[in-house]
Amino acid sequence: MEQADRMSDLDILRPSWDDYFMGITDLVATRSTCLRRKVGAIIVRDKRILCSGYNGAPSGIAHCSETGCLREKMMIPSGEKHELCRGVHAEQNAIIQAACHGISVKNSVLYCTNQPCSICAKMIINAGILHVCFRQAYNDPMSAEMFSQAGISFTIINGKVES
């Protein structure tokens, strides 16, 4: 009986899989070089991490911390004109890293600190990712609409989608 009690105490202390992966995603976000928003992403299949990514300038290109934020300089609101940014989004970097290493992300789950934008949603759909978990909403309603049309479910962890 004593061993069973210890097991239940241990289970109480262990995070759920979603909380575990979101915690790792938060850590990945700390590598971001974006001045406006630090975003991390990991792609998981069968409770195993396949790859990770964070937002920032492409490899070999000066970071925004060195050049300044183009979007701030141009006063571009969040959620608009995604193409006017030096950075690669965390979700994009995770998918790119998988491709660089020959790892299929088909039938996987993407964990991200923020709701993916519509550009990332298109990549997620075409990559065959089945489910997306995120913590914070992002002002891009087209993203959720495309996920719905593609049959990709999503879960908000520790937060609610804001309109």
Image (cartoon, rainbow, N blue to C red):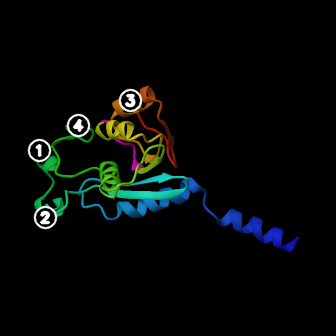
Q: Nearer the viewer, residue 69 or 107?
A: 107
Tell which residue pokes out farthest to the bottom in this image.
Answer: 2
**Secondary structure type for disc 4:** loop
The amino acid type, in three-letter code, at marker 2 is Glu
- First of labels 4, 2 by sequence position: 2
- The residue identified by callout 3 is 146
The amino acid type, in three-letter code, at marker 4 is Glu
Q: Residues within 10 Å of mark 1 (few under 14, many from 20)?
A: few
Comparing marks 3 and 2, which lies closer to the viewer?
3
Q: Is residue 104 magenta?
A: no
- First of labels 2, 1 by sequence position: 2
User: Where is residue 66, by image quadrant?
Assistant: bottom left
Residue 8 in percent (x, y) is at 76, 64
Q: Which residues are magenta?
A: 113-118
- First of labels 1, 4 by sequence position: 1
- Mark number displayed over residue 80: 4
Please, is residue 158 above or below residue 76 in the view?
A: below
- First of labels 3, 1 by sequence position: 1
Q: Residues within 10 Å of mark 4 (few under 14, many from 20)?
A: few
Comparing marks 2 and 1, which lies closer to the viewer?
2
- First of labels 3, 2 by sequence position: 2
Pointers 3 and 1 in contact (C-beta within 8 Å): no
- The residue identified by callout 1 is 74
